[in-house]
Image (cartoon, grey):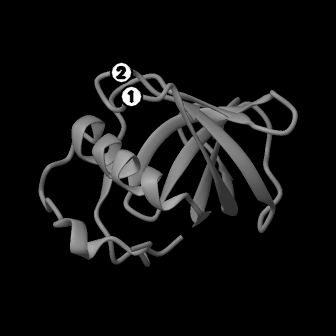
Amino acid sequence: MPEQRKLDRRDFSDYLRLMNENTGELVGHLADISTDGFRLECKTPIVVDLEFLLRMDITSDIADKGYLVFAARSRWCQIDPVDPTIYNVGFQLIDIAPEDVEIFIRIFEKYGSDNKNNKKNSDYLWR
């Protein structure tokens, strides 16, 4: 898959689960994050162009609330090249509450491991 991203993407250094808000089921674990989306490592393949309402539990060092809920759409799904029991699934953020945008940016900046391109808040897509 050719690289088509225009925004900085960072590997995610902590173990963070994303759950389906409607069913409570685990969707996957955050593997990398950008300012407009993220990649999950999943145990099962995810249908492309499927919209999810996701819940991300967060810690008190990120925000005063315990979780974020936002909508995201699956954009691609591939078997992991190193571990064929895992599927890498790319998601695009499609709806996030305005008050949660800053929290998502904080997660990106605090836990993303590649600091090559620190972006200003005005560079994010969903403002």
Is residue 84 visible in this depiction of the protein? Answer: no
Residue 120 vs 21, above or below: the answer is: below
Label 2 sits on what residue type?
Ser
Percent of width and height locating residue 108 = 32, 47
125 on left or right of 29 = left
- Image point 74% across, 49% down: which residue? 53
35 on left or right of 116 = right
Percent of width and height locating residue 93 = 56, 62
Contact (Cβ within 8 Å) of mark 1 with mark 2: yes
Mark 1 Cα shell of 10 Å, populated few (<14), some (14-19), many (≥20): few
Q: At numbered mark 2, what does the secondary structure look like: helix, strand or loop?
A: loop
13 on left or right of 22 = left
**Observer-nearest of 25 and 66:** 66
Please name which of the two marks, 1 or 2, marks the residue nearer to the observer: 1
Percent of width and height locating residue 31 = 47, 39
Viewport quadrant of the N terminus: bottom right
Residue 22: quadrant of the picture: top right
- Image point 36% across, 37% down: which residue? 12
- Image point 68% across, 44% down: which residue? 54
**Observer-nearest of 94 and 38:** 94
Percent of width and height locating residue 102 = 34, 53
The residue labelled by disc 1 is 64
Residue 60: quadrant of the picture: top left
**Observer-nearest of 117 and 87:** 117
Residue 120: quadrant of the picture: bottom left
Going by the picture, which residue comes out furthest to the right?
A: 23
The residue labelled by disc 2 is 60
Is residue 124 visible in this depiction of the protein? Answer: yes
**Observer-nearest of 95 and 6:** 95
Mark 2 Cα shell of 10 Å, populated few (<14), some (14-19), many (≥20): few
